[in-house]
Amino acid sequence: MQNESPGNKPIDVLILAAGLGTRMRSGIAKVLHRLGETPLINHVCRTAAALGPDKIYVVVGHQADEVKKAVLEEIEADRVEFVMQKEQLGTGDAVNAAREHFTDRDSTLLILSGDVPLIRHETLASLVQYHHNHRGRGAAATVLTVKLKDPTGYGRVGRSGEGLFDRIVEQKDASNVELEINEINAGIYCFDSRKLFAALAEVKNDNAQGEYYLTDVPAMLREAGEDVAVYSHSDHKEIEGVNNRVQLAEMERVLRRRTVQRLMLDSGVTFIDPKSVYISERAKFGRDTVIYPNVSVEGNSEIGDGCTIRQGTRLTNARVGHGVEILDNCVVADSEIGNGCTVGPMAHLRGKAVMMEGAKVGNFVEMKKTRLGRGSKANHLTYLGDATIGDKTNIGAGTITCNYDGKNKHETHIGNDVKIGSDTMLVAPVKVGDGAATGAGSVVTKEVEAGELVAGVPARPLKQRAE
Ligand code: UD1
Ligand code: MG
């Protein structure tokens, strides 16, 4: 989209985000509640930034510092201007707080609500275009509306006998007849900035909530003989607002469905039960990967082609190669799994655990900050922490790297082709050379040389393993 409107006016965006959100019954400002993994306000900022406006104004008030911090994680500081609304006296007052920025400015101002997160930038671009082209000369204001089966809670948009815009009535101020109207105000508008601020100075708070309503402005402009347009949109899911936790949960469902559908259609991922999975919008998948029910894939996880992820597994910031099988009920966080590996059931990889190609980790195995080499196996009941393990090594059932002495963490290094016997305790720092072996129940406190077989408590050399 071009920055310049047909009339050469710049486009600005203003996002309302100062309210507390009483209906959330929360200690956290509403716009900071998360939808998917992202605060509501960040969804809106992302969409606003995608339009490429001149400036993005964000009106803050409740928990202003936290809201600012969230916004700055989404857009660069030089693209955004924060406006402080000291007291939350209504949406009209919130916009009015930005007045000083507009004294010498003549722009098209697109107003968005911080609690309407699923609006798409394509829809906003069409709205702006519609606003500019209205009757060939552009409108003073354009209101985005949608028809809802249940319009409860929203401002209703009244139209004249000819179907032109008449006024917006808030739920709490509406008569029984007006409550029957199912065309609602989405809280998204385009204004001629000069006409908006001129009218805002006249807005009164003589209504059911004693607030200064932004929603009064379009009717005021119409009464002053200005053109007010209505842009009616068909997809109601995009414009739904979050005012309580029921709506938030409902929207979460919509967002999840969008993500899963995109992955099925564009990335070729199979979901056995699409409704039961939680997939981050940021996660990436290869083709022909199959996801079983109740799987969560969070953060910046990347999963390759032809993988199978079984029931109840959670992956957080995981990198998974091709042809990997992750069995039921595993947790993989901040870790990497190479091509052709098998994990689980009930394995736990965390804190930079790395499995090299073809490695296997079985049931009740935990790995932390540990590299398990190519084709190596740790199949049962094992803890591997702060360790490097070479290729084709077998870690017997019940092995533990005793990496913590109560104060510090120490490392264990195990070479290639090693056989660690069942129930071996490796008291770190300790090294086990290539081709060495430990007997069942060994407590290894000293370096084991390459090819050596040790056993006992503490473990002592028995003979060369080759013999
Ligand atoms: C508003 C509209 C309503 C519309 C609905 C769409 C008004 C008066 N009503 O109602 O017509 O159908 O949105 O979702 O505008 N805010 C401030 N400062 C304030 C008050 C609110 O910044 O003083 C912010 C809130 O943080 C929120 C947004 O404005 O992001 C909307 O406020 P909210 O209280 O949710 O308005 P609704 O009752 O939903
Ligand atoms: Mg709202």
Image (cartoon, grey):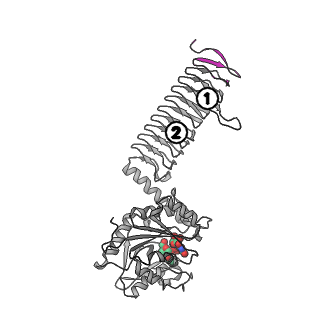
Find residue 466 and report its horizontal and vertical position in percent.
Answer: 56, 13
Residue extending farthest to the bottom is: 224
Is 354 displayed left or right of 183 in the figure?
A: right
Helix, strand or loop under label 1: loop
Q: Give the residue number, with chain letter if any, for mark 2.
A: 327
Residue 245 drawn above or below residue 431: below
Element assignment for label 2: loop
Q: Which mark is residue 397?
A: 1
- Residue 451 part of the magenta-drawn span: yes
Above or below residue 233? Residue 370 is above
Q: Vertically, is 322 above or below 293?
A: above
Residue drawn 48% across and 46% down? Answer: 301
Q: Position of residue 69 (x, y in %)?
A: 54, 61
Three-letter code for the amino acid on which mark 2 is drawn: Leu
The range drawn in magenta is: 442-467
In the orientation shown, which residue stands out farthest toward the front?
Answer: 104
Pick the residue in front: 18 or 34. 18
Given residues 455 and 407, the one toward you in this image is 407
> Quarter of the image containing the N terminus?
bottom left
Q: Which of the 4 quarters of the picture holds residue 166? A: bottom left
